[in-house]
Image (cartoon, grey):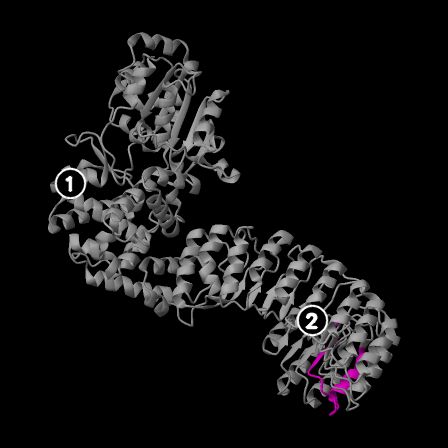
Amino acid sequence: MDKHTVLTHILKPMGMSTLLGGELPVSVINNSGYISQLTRQAQWTGGNADDNLSSLDHAIHTALSGEIRSVMLMGPEGSGKTTALEKLVVDWAKGEHLQNFSFVFYFRLREINSLEGVLSLEALMQHHHGHMPPESMPLVLQKPENVLFVFDDLDQFKRNLDPSVHTLCSDPSQAVSVSCLIASLLHGSLLKGAAFVVATRPMGCPKFLSGARVEVLGFLKPQREAYFNGFFTDPAAASKALIHMERTLGFYDFCTSPRFCWTVCSIYKTLMDAGAKLPETLSQMCVDILVHLIQALSLSEACNRELVLALGRMASHCSLDQHSSCTKEELDSFGFQRFLASVGVFLQVDGDLDSDACVFSFTSQLMQEFILAVSFFLNKSTSEGVEKMLKEHKVHAKFPDLFLSGLSEPIQRRPLETLLGEFNPDQIMDFKSWFKSSSEETLKGFYKDRHMRCFHLLHQAQNKSLVKEIITASARTGISYGDLSLQDCVALNYVITCLGEMKLLNLYRTRNLTEEQAEVLAPAMSLSHKILLSDSSLSAGAVPHLASAVSRGLTKELDLKGTRLGDEKCKILCAGLRDCKLHNLNLRVCRLTEASCEDLVFVLTSSASQLCVFDISFNEIGDQGLVKLCKALHSPQCKLQQLQLLSCGLTAASMEALSAALCSGNSELREVELARNTIGDTGMEALCKALQHPLCKLQSLKLSDNELTGACCHHLMESLMSEHCSLSELDLSVNDLGQEGGLLLCRALSQPGCPLEKLGLKRCELTQLVFKELGSLLTSGSSRLKSLIVGMHKVGDQGVKHLWAAVAHPNCLLEELDVEMTGLTDACVEDLSAAVRASKTLKNLELRNNSLTDASVPALIRVMEDSPIMQELNLRYNDFSEEVFNMLYESDKVRF
C-alpha cells in the first residue's frame, strides 16, 4: 500500500471550516495545530499538553502495539475524535507510528449510511479507497493481522450491528448488506485477526462490541492554553481570550471540546478585531455566534426571521423525537424550501443537496437548544406557554431555560432583534412571570439542585436588580450548598455578589473544594458573615483563596470542623488569616498537632486579631501544643474569650502554663473546656490556683471525664469560696468524686459568696447523703444555683426526694434539673408533681432512662399542663407502652 498516496489523499483539503462544525481536521493537521486530547486516566494523573504519556494518541498506540486488536474511543460531540483518527492515519503514512500494520483503512460510517443494496468487502474498500492499487487486495486478504480498520462516527451509523440479527459472512468477495458487512468485520468473522479503532459518542457505543475502551476527555486547562496560544498570533490576545473564556465559560463540560474552543477563538477574534465587548455568559456567547452566522448570509430581516423559525421547528422536532438528523422531506415541512442552499451555514449536510437521500443535522447540541429558545421568543403565531414548552423538552435538552433567561433581558437580545426583528413581548412576559413565581417557590424549599438551577438562570440574565427582587428574606439560602460543581460555584458567586452580603454561606460536606472552585467563590466568601465548611475536604490550593477572602471580607465566623486540614494546610490558612476580623474559628477534628500551634499563635496575637471563640478540640496538640497556645494568652493583642480543648491529649503537665496564662492580667478568657483530657487531680490543683487569683476572669470551666477524684475537691472548695472566684459554670461530670468530694463541693456551694449558677455532676459516684446535702443548700437561701445536672447515680426515689423538696421550697432558684438514670419509679411522681406545682422557677426537667411506667403518665401530663412556668419534661427511655403515646402526643411540653 503506497503510504504517500494515502497521505496525499487524507491531507487533501475538502470543504471549508465552519463555525459550529469546527475547524476541518485536515486543516488542523496541515497547520501543525494538532494537540492530542486527554483520556480519563490522564485526568487523575494530571496530564499536561506536552505530556505524551497522558495523551489519547499514546493510549491508542500503546493498545495496538500489543495483543489488543480492538480499541473503542468514546467521547462527546466535538471532543476531537475525528481529528485524532485522521492524525492516526497520517502518522502511520509518515512512518512515525503503528508500523506493525501494512494497511490502514479509514471509514466515516455516517457516509456509508447512504450506500444501498449489497456489496462485498472488496467492493467497499475499492469504493472508499480507490487510491489502493488492485495488487494490494490479495495481501490484505492473506494477512489480516497486518490490517488496521479505522471507523469513525459509529453512533451515526443508522443500521443495526447486533450480530444476533445477522448471518455474519466470512468471504471477502461475498455481497451482503452494508450492515451485515460492517457487523461481520467488527465481530471478527470477516478478515479475522484485523485490528480496529472505532470512535463513537458514549451513548452510541454498543455493549456487544469488545475491546479496550478509552474515554476521550478532550481539552483540559493545559490543552486549552496551548490551543489558544496556537490560534492567536499575538500572545497578549491569546492570554486575554483564554482568561476571559476560563472565567465566563470554562466551567462548562463542553469547553473540553476542541471544536468549541475553535468556535470560541473564532468569535473572540472577530469581536476583539472589531473592538467589541466579549460575552459574559453562555447566552451572550451563543447570541454572538448566531449573529455571526446570520450576517454571513446577507439576507433581509424577514428572511432571517423565517429561516431562524424554520431552524427552531427543526430543533424542537429533533429534541422531542430524539432525532439526530432530518431528511430533505422533513426539512421542507419545517419551511426551509427557500433556504436549502443556505442551511450549510447552520447544519451538517451529509450527501448531495439534490438527492432525496441527503440528511441534515445540527452540528452542535448546544446551538440546537439555543435556536429552540430564540425561536420560542421570536414566534408571534403561537400561544404555547413557557412552562409547557420547557416541560416538553426537559428530558433531552439541558439549556433552554438558561437561554430563555438570557434572552429575556433586552440588552442581551438586542443584537439578534437588529437582524430578526422584535421578539414576542407576550412570550417574554410569560417567561418572566413563570421565572419569578417558580423561583420564589423553589427558594422556599430545601432542594439544593433546584436552588442552583434558579441561580444559573439569574446568572444568565445578568440583572442585579432581578436577583434582589427574587432572592428575598423568605429564601432558604442557609441550606447546604456543599459539593457544588465549578459551574454551580460561578452561579452562586454571582448571586451573592449581586446581593452584597450573605448571612451564611453553607458549604457543609463539600467532598473536594478545589483551587478553581475556591477562587471562583472567593468574592462570595468575602461577603459572607459565616462560612460553614464542616465535614468538608479542602485541597491545598483552595486554602489560600479561603483565607484571603476571610481576611478582606465580612466573615466573622469560620467553621472548618471535621475538614482533616492537617498541619501543612493549617500553616497556609494561618498565614492568610493574620489580618482577619474573625470572631469565631472552629478547627475541631482537623488532624492538627503541636506543629500547628505556633502558626495559630500568630493569628491569635496579630494586631488585627478579633478572635474571641476558638475551638481546637479533638486534635492531638498535646501538652507542648497547649503551652505554645498559652503564649498567646499572655499577649495584650489576644482577644480570646472562649477556648475549647476537648480530647487534645492534655495532661497535668500543661495545666501550670494554662493557670499562669489565666492569671497574667492580659487573658480575656471567660470559658475553657478541657473535657476528655487526663489532667487528673494534679492538673486540677494547678487550675484552682488560677480560680482564686484576682486577675483571672474565668466564668465557665468544663472538666468532664478528666480522671479527677475526691482528692481534688478540697482545692476546688477553697477556690469556690475565694472572694476572687468568678466561676458561674462548672462541669465535673464523669469523674470519680465520690461521697467525700461531693460533700466538700456542697460545703462550698452553701457559702453566700459562691458564684456558681450551673453545676454538672453527672456520673460522679455520688450517694444519697450528697443528694441530701444538695437539697439543703438549695433551700438555704445562699445558693445561686439555677442548673443542676446530677444524673446517672443509683440513689433511687429516696435520694432524689431531697431534690423534690428543695424544688418546692421558695428559696430554691433552680430552672433546670437533670436526674437522668437515677432509678426513679412511679413512687416519686406525687413528690415530683408537688414540687413542680410549688416551684416559681423550674422550666426544664430531665427524667430520661428511669423506671416510670404508664401509671405515671396522666399525673405527669396534668402537672405540665397546670404549670405556667415549665417548658419541657423529657421522658424518653422510660418503661412506657405504646398505649400511652397518644396521651403523650397531646402535650407539646413533653418529649418521649
Picture coordinates of residue 120 (x, y %)? 30, 15
Q: Is 437 placed left or right of 531 in the picture?
A: left
Picture coordinates of residue 712 (x, y %)? 85, 72
Tell me the residue at 37%/11% (across/down): 141
- The one nearer the camera, 182 or 287, is 287
Count of picture labels: 2
Which quarter of the rendered picture does the N terminus lie within? Answer: top left
- The one nearer the camera, 573 or 430, is 573
Pointer 1 local density, CA inside 10 Å: few below 14, some 14–19, many at least 20 = some
Residue 642 sits in quarter: bottom right
Give the residue pinned by disc 1: 332
Residue 131 sits in quarter: top left
Earlier residue among tags 2 and 1: 1
Q: Which mark is residue 611?
A: none
Mark 2 residue element: loop
- The verdict on residue 814 being magenta is yes
Residue 589, compared with residue 750, is above or below; it is above
Pointer 2 local density, CA inside 10 Å: few below 14, some 14–19, many at least 20 = some
Give the residue pinned by disc 2: 880
Picture coordinates of residue 787 (x, y %)? 71, 80
Q: Mark 2 is on which residue type?
A: Phe
